[in-house]
Amino acid sequence: MSNCLFCKIVAGEIPSSKVYEDDQIFVFNDISPKAAVHLLVIPKIHIVSLDDLTSEHQVLIAYMMLKLPELARAQGLDDGFRTIINTGPGGGQEVGHLHLHILGGKGMPGFN
Ligand code: AMP
Ligand code: ZN
């Protein structure tokens, strides 16, 4: 999508602090971290939110989920991590490209 912030990050048109990339996903540091470790994991293809998933995305979403422990461990989060996905305005989603937050380490916010 031409006007999507995260598509532009994937394309390298907007700089990011990348920590991992493969053919399906792109992972980078959140620009405004809410904990010592705060990553965003996104699919390279443009999907707005969980609300827009279809059965065509089944393998991609499973792939993203299966990658999370490895990504967290690579950040030193050996004893666990938190994942958050905000969906739509009611869920507090600010960027309209599906993204999964990985949070951990010092300063991790509570559930409120
Ligand atoms: P959400 O509220 O779930 O849509 O989360 C959007 C996240 O994207 C927020 O945590 C922002 O800090 C983060 N963010 C916004 N712009 C950028 C950017 N250019 N690079 C990295 N993270 C960003
Ligand atoms: Zn996008």
Image (spheres, rainbow, N blue to C red):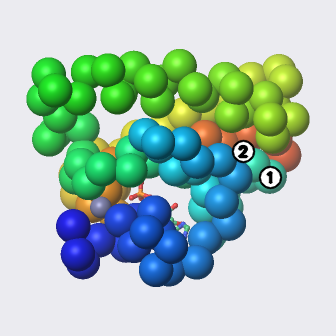
Vertical comparison of 43 with 12: above or below: above
For the point 44% across and 47% down, which residue is it? 42
Q: Secondary structure at mark 2?
A: loop
* Sequence-wise first label, 2 or 1: 1
Residue carrying label 1: 36
Q: Residue furthest front?
A: 23
User: Image point 26% across, 54% down: which residue?
Assistant: 46
Q: Is residue 67 left or right of residue 2?
A: right
Q: Mark 1: which secondary structure?
A: loop
Q: Amino acid at mark 2?
A: Met
CA neighbours of label 2 inside 10 A, class few (<14), some (14 to 19), many (20+): some
Q: Mark 2 or mark 1: which is in front?
A: 1
Q: Position of residue 28 (x, y in %)?
A: 61, 56
* Dot 2 and dot 1 residues touching (CB under 8 Å): yes
- In the picture of the structure, the residue carrying the numbered disc 2 is 108
In the image: residue 50, left or right of residue 100? left
- Nearest the camera: 58 or 81? 58
